[in-house]
Amino acid sequence: MTTQTLRDCWTWSSAWHRVLPLCGALTLAFGLAGCNLVNKFVAKDLLNEGARQYNKGHYEKAEKIFKEAIERDPDFLQAKLFYATAIRSRVNNEDGEEQIKAAKQAIEAYMELLKPENEKRLKERDRDQTYAFIADLYKTLDDQKSYQEWLKKRAELPNQKPTTKAECLYSIGVIYWNEATKISRKYETQVPGKLPEVAKPDKWKKEDIDALLQAVQTGLKYIEEAIAADPRYANAYSYKSLLLKEQAKATADPKVVNQLEQAAQEAVEKFQELNRQAAAELSGSS
């Protein structure tokens, strides 16, 4: 046992020597309600200690302390929030099976916060972050269906900020762009010193053309919804362009291809325009 561990043990031992007599006295005076009051006091003390350990990067130790705080006071919402955060902080420090295990534990902890009796007490910011973290954890688990589901839920939260809503819908659009590129890459030929050449659609399998076009149309739907939510969300225009380019790859009619490429270029120009405006606003405010 290290010196620090001994010091911790001594500190907690001293604390309990103060708390136990108080619990006994309050129980005699007020019954169970008095001891519940002591448990709330101890839970707050544990929360502060857990926060100190968390800030030192001792996530597992913080996690255990926050869990103990919850056991002391099952209604302690802040302890539940900190407990979920401590588990999530371990996810990026793990890999393989341990990362998967930590991610699932974090999802479970955040789901606890969304039970009706807890969610109604969450601050708007904490509720939004809870939905965001659950979505991100499903992404870590490569569960695209659940990732998309929680992005939608976050986008549809009451009083959601337009930019946040746009970000969620845009992220779903990116999922479908990825699906489209997985298909088109099967028909690419690598050329040294040049961009890959894509075979003409008459060389593609029909099911691949259909699947790519479906992915593009669904992706564009979410991208357009993102733009409607926040017309100044620049990244949406970038992926609108990329999706239109994917559609062009699987399109045989030269006239339609030309229209798609023109629309893609217009989306790129809008993306660039918005980025210039944002840069100008940033420099003007500094």
Image: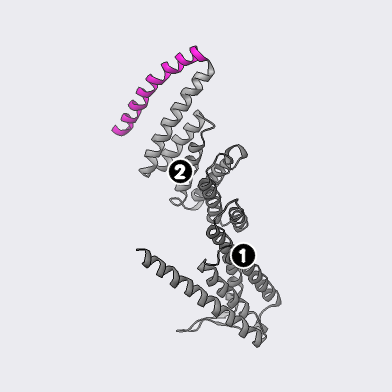
Work out which residue is located at the far bottom of the displayed protein and give it.
Answer: 254
Would you place residue 278 above or below residue 190 in this image?
A: above
What's the residue type where badge 2 is placed?
Ala
Residue at the spot 51% in from the left edge and 15% down from the top edge: 30
Q: Nearer the viewer, residue 79 or 155?
A: 155
Q: Residues within 10 Å of mark 1 (few under 14, many from 20)?
A: some
Magenta residues, as a range? 1-30
Determine the image quadrant of residue 254.
bottom right
Which mark is drawn over residue 225?
A: 1
Determine the image quadrant of residue 219.
bottom right
261 inside magenta stretch: no
7 inside magenta stretch: yes
| Element on which disc 1 rests | helix
Would you place residue 88 above or below residue 25 in this image?
A: below
- Looking at the picture, how far across and down is residue 36, in whole percent? 51, 23
**On the image, numbered disc 2 is attached to which residue?**
86
Dominant secondary structure, magenta? helix
* Residue 176 visible to the viewer: yes
Residue at the spot 48% in from the left edge and 47% down from the top edge: 88
**Quadrant holding the C terminus:** bottom left
- Looking at the picture, how far across and down is residue 99, in whole percent? 49, 50
| Element on which disc 2 rests | helix
Quote the CA–CA distance across marks 2 and 1: 34 Å
Display colour scheme = one colour
Q: Residues within 10 Å of mark 2 (few under 14, many from 20)?
A: many
- Looking at the picture, how far across and down is residue 259, in whole percent? 62, 83
Would you place residue 244 above or below residue 4 in this image?
A: below
